Amino acid sequence: MHLGSERELVTFLVSAENDGKRLDVVLASLLDGHSRSRCQALIRTGALIIDGATISEPKYRVKQDQQLCFKEPAPLDAEPEPQNIPLTILFEDEAIIVIDKPAGMVVHPAASVEKDTLVNALLFHCGDSLIGIGGVKRPGIVHRLDKDTSGVMIAAKTDAAHHSLSAQFADHGKNGPLRRTYNAFVWGVPDPEIGTIDAMVGRSTQNRTKQAIVEKNGRHAITHYKTLAAFGGDKWTVSKIACQLETGRTHQIRVHLAHIGNALLGDPTYGTGFESRERNLPMKVQKSLKSLARQALHAVDLTIAHPVSGEQMHFSSQLPDDMKNLENALQTAGS
């Protein structure tokens, strides 16, 4: 079944196969789009009546032929304001929405950015198709891209989808198909040209707004990379690389690549110290880099297991125009 926006009263009879099972387990099996944790929260709010009595204990063991009456409270309106912001949608169904995020768009509202975010746009676009994540009508953000990183992002529209996707991202693809690949343009040529960066990432002790490689109080972080192309002249070298994340820490790719001496072109935070190299670039490349006005990083591929069907799904996004222009300038200058 699928609950409509009117949140009607729904009645079930406990079947023989559910006799003796926990109430939260049974409810989760009966309600599409609801995770077990969400069902536990609903039970505790008194949303379930069994044979005329309100049961608020998720561990309650149901009995065959008991009558379960359920009325889900309408999800609370999300605090962010829905805004009619155009989106490039790669895929959408009742459970998920996949978008091609443009550079310059913040994913989630914060104290410094309260509107014009991806969440504001999704609230407007999805509307009543958002069943409610944790009882709030909002999209389930399971991973983020930095404001100035473009590319493929996925969000959940139901609580169950949010639970499934969160588990996939937390598992880092160890037991499923999850894969995240980025294209980047970096200073120099990585050595070796194919490799793995395994270094903990945590908040910088020198600048609390930045991340850094740390020896303690950090989070395990692994980035696999492959050099796709190299460009250069007498005084400059730039590479196009592909990065595959095994973990997803804040600014992970940017910090890891700067750590091995191959910071992203255009990165104002982790590329400091590389600015002097810009004057050695051919003028056409300098102009393209100035027009880019951001770190040269794009989420090009995302593979997941669909949270409902389990089907392996692959989504991709071509390089946006600003990075294509940079690549074209590099190819011309480096030929």
Image (cartoon, rainbow, N blue to C red):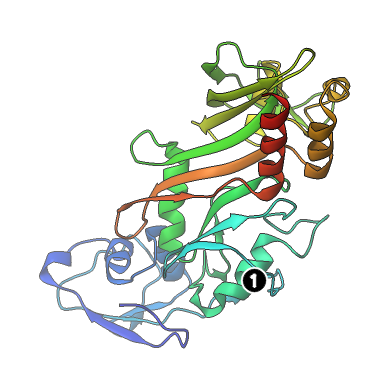
Q: On the picture, is 136 further left or further right than 231?
A: left
Which residue in the structure is indicated by mark 1?
A: 78
Q: Residue 272: image x %, image y %?
A: 84, 25
x 54%, y 76%: residue: 75
**How crowded is the residue under tag 1: few (<14 C-alpha within 10 Å), some, or many (20+)?**
some
Type of residue at label 1? Ala
- Looking at the rendered structure, the secondary structure element under dot 1 is loop
Q: On the picture, is 51 further left or further right than 56?
A: left
Say which of 43 and 33 sits in front. 33
x 28%, y 84%: residue: 11
Q: In the rendered image, which quarter is residue 187 located in? A: top right
Q: In the rendered image, which quarter is residue 274 located in? A: top right
Say which of 9 and 165 sits in front. 165
Residue with the most extreme left position: 16
In the image, is residue 286 above or below residue 67?
Answer: above
x 31%, y 68%: residue: 27
Asked if residue 41 can be seen in this view, the reply is yes
Q: In the rendered image, which quarter is residue 241 located in? A: top right
x 57%, y 43%: residue: 299
In the image, is residue 247 above or below residue 140?
Answer: above
In the image, is residue 211 above or below residue 169?
Answer: above
Asked if residue 268 can be seen in this view, the reply is no
